[in-house]
DNA sequence: ACACGTTAAATCACGGCCTGAAGAAAGCCC
DNA sequence: GGGCTTTCTTCAGGCCGTGATTTAACGTGT
């Protein structure tokens, strides 16, 4: 149980590189001095490791800061243009491919609507690959500088054996009718870049954790409230994946056993009570033919205008949502809950107080007291950013391991 | 995020010791040869580390086995009598203290009923300390050979800062009315032994994972079904604790928002539908004045005899239980669910098929397909065993670190 | 200008670690 | 007794992080 495999003396160096690289990446320009303080490494080791990273071009000096009277500190940072990342969002209505630099600044993006052919997997793969080619071409980016492609998909992702170059990645989705689609193999046929695939809600949560309302929390749950409902659980600073990477499927938690029919085929799911699709449908007064987003906006406007049925519907949704959040608090004991997703951001300002109250009423006192409930800061566009964090995470975790094809071209 | 702190070259040795010790502990007598194979360490290192452990008396040779034609393998094992462990169960009706050897064989136990003074914390602490003295005296065990005392309590345990010798341990329990009881400090006043405290349901789950139906699983949830309902979540082979160690409070998951009133004060909790206390109360036909256990047995007998209301009540309980297990499957994506606890073991044989069906009906297809649902193998007595695994786990994890007072007396 | 104090970074000997190869040990078979 | 096989031990070699020492780079005061 929990035996971490064999460790050679070399893994220490990888660990040190990783620690330093992560600190520099997340905590901005830092001197060797400060790096030693916060990482616990000795000054000698910091110098040594930073020297290596400098030689690899993974770190660069950027100015200095005087230190009253003594030698000035040299600031170090991870050069944002040292490498690139690709994030893909396979959404309900479109496939979006974005190219980022190492600092996750978006350099280019490509959108392809998904109206005609639906979610036929061959079509989606084709769109991903064309999008990838487009963003690379538009920016004149050498594919050799891309650390990897992260893809957020709707559905459950089976990661397969690691080390098989992503070939084992398989996607299951009851909602878009993907049954064991071998996305890894299919994408691999069109690109040599390292592939990372995860659920889109999870990647959005990842983005919120890194750059949004989740920053700094080590134990958090990002509750994603959109057309459906999902969650991304972070424990000890890393995604909680479970045995086959599908942990956090919150939308089909039973809040009312034997209750409303859900699109998953079961009854009483949270999603059937608070999902945007369900809300709009239950309200039944959205302008015919309008989008789900417009429908929800109309519902919200009606409630703001004081229309009784809209007010009640939203109040009920807040109660169910809060109760389900209470379940998350009881089960995961997070220090923070972040409510994200487009519907969450739209309804959040109105519902947050009621959600907090419901969570307090339904959760156990002690874990509830340890938890704050806040709105997310990132819009749904952040799915691509989150997807791009997948290869980025691998990069940082491995201590700055570059694909073989890139290591020669240390541009600094 | 997820930066594991600084590692010195010495931590490697600790890791190796820990790995080897764990393998030997769990996988019985093994030769250096086999140890090298399964741990990934080189033969040289194994010899080296085992030499250390032998010198510390943490490992002993135990016979040899011929190896067709070559030098025979020398088998190694962890000597069960090298040290002792204490497990304490602070239950609903009694305080039970048990002394174990390193192999978790029970050497002595002491029970004290908790009828008169209820759960007054001073009284409980007193009983624990007398029980501890009793088992040590009865077996003539030198306290210096005790690795630590593990305590399972009803309620939520706040671990406090590690390294403070357990002084920060505080217990909260809405059911037995403990509000921030500083159990660590209180016990520390009466003993110098290392202290470990956790929720009793969690320790029972721990026992089930180590020696019961959970053996070998790296991701599992032990669902504990007794008077109340709880869960112990194991991820990556270790307990999932969350931010403040209270993760896994499953009994108050909302299965029916706004439904039955629960003893926690909230409505619609799982426990209010399937907890033994709730079932017996709802049935309403248990012999007056009988214990909860007897009441549940009577309910079961009535159902076996075909009495309609009993049959229906149990069928409903199975459905709710299965639905709540479906939530666990969706949220934690375990490879195994173990149903334990005294009520679980009592009703399990009858309800398991229905629970499995309900879980299948309510959970998402993919994660459900990855999970097996089985009955636990250990009775509720295992709480003490589970509690004793707390110090044992520390011992194995640290690579066989002995309290200072013991290391001199390497008896071999 | 110039020495002095101060702070930051680089260097280096040291003790530890794991590996891998070579050697020693312990049994069997002929 | 001489091979042969298999297991275990020993040891050189390459790395690693530490901590002390040295060097670098800057203010300040004279």
Image (cartoon, coloured by chain):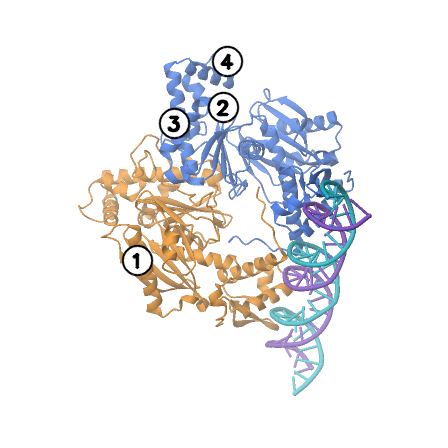
Chain colours: A orange, B blue, C cyan, D purple
Chain letter behind tag 2: B
Query: Residues at badges 2 and 3 in contact (C-beta under 8 Å)?
Result: no
Could you say where residue A320 lies in the image, as x and y percent from the top left?
35, 37
Same-subunit check for callouts 4 and 1: no
Q: Residues within 10 Å of mark 2 (few under 14, many from 20)?
A: many
Which residue matches tag 2?
Answer: B343
* Above or below for A94 versus B177: below
Could you say where residue A191 lies in the image, as x and y percent from the top left?
38, 60
Secondary structure of the residue carrying tag 3 is: helix
Q: Foreground mark, 4 or 2?
A: 2
Dividing the picture into quadrants, the one containing residue A105 is bottom left
Query: Residues at badges 1 and 3 in contact (C-beta under 8 Å)?
Result: no
The disc at residue A127 is 1
Q: Foreground mark, 1 or 3?
A: 1
Chain letter behind tag 4: B
Which residue matches tag 4?
Answer: B289
Give the Cα separation between the discs numbered 1 and 2.
54 Å
Quadrant of image for the C terminus of chain B: top right
Q: Residues within 10 Å of mark 1 (few under 14, many from 20)?
A: many
Which residue matches tag 3?
Answer: B319
Give the Cα separation between the discs numbered 4 and 1.
70 Å
Is B37 positioned to the left or the right of A329 in the image?
Answer: right
The disc at residue A14 is none
């Amino acid at each position: 149980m929990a035996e971490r495999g064999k460790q050679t003396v070399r893994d220490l160096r990888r660990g040190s590189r990783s620690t330093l690289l992560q600190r520099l990446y997340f905590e901005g320009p830092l001197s060797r001095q400060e790096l030693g303080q916060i990482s616990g490494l000795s000054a000698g080791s910091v110098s040594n490791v930073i020297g290596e990273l400098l030689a690899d071009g993974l770190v660069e000096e950027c100015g200095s800061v005087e230190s009253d009277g003594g030698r000035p500190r040299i600031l170090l940072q991870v050069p944002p243009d040292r490498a690139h990342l690709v994030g893909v969002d396979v959404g309900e209505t479109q496939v979006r491919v974005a190219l980022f630099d190492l600092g996750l600044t978006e350099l280019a993006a490509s959108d392809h609507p998904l109206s005609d052919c639906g979610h036929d997997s061959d079509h989606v793969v084709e769109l991903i690959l064309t999008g990838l080619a487009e963003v690379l071409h538009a920016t004149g980016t050498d594919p050799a500088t891309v650390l990897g492609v992260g893809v957020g998909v709707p559905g459950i992702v089976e990661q397969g054996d690691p080390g098989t170059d992503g070939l084992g990645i398989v996607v299951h989705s009851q909602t878009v009718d993907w049954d064991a689609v071998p996305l890894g193999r299919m994408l691999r046929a069109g690109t040599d870049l390292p592939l990372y695939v995860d659920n889109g809600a999870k990647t959005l949560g990842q983005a919120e954790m890194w750059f949004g309302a989740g920053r700094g929390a080590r134990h958090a749950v990002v509750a994603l409230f959109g057309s459906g409902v999902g969650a991304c659980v972070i424990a000890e600073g890393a995604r909680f994946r479970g045995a086959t990477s599908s942990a956090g499927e919150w939308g089909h938690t039973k809040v009312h056993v034997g209750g409303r029919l859900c699109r998953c085929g079961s009854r009483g799911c949270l999603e059937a009570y608070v999902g945007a699709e369900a809300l709009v449908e239950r309200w039944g007064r959205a302008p015919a033919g309008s989008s789900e987003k417009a429908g929800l906006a109309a519902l919200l406007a009606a409630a703001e205008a004081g229309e009784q049925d809209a007010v009640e519907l939203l109040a009920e949704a807040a109660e169910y949502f809060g109760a389900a959040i209470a379940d998350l608090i009881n089960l995961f004991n997070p220090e923070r809950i972040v409510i994200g997703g487009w519907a969450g951001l739209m309804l959040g300002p109105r519902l947050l107080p009621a959600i907090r109250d419901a969570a307090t009423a339904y959760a156990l006192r002690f874990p509830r007291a340890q938890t704050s409930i806040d709105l997310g800061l990132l819009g749904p566009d952040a799915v691509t950013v989150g997807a791009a964090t997948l290869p980025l995470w691998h990069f940082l975790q491995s201590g700055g391991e570059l694909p073989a094809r890139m290591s020669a071209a240390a541009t600094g």
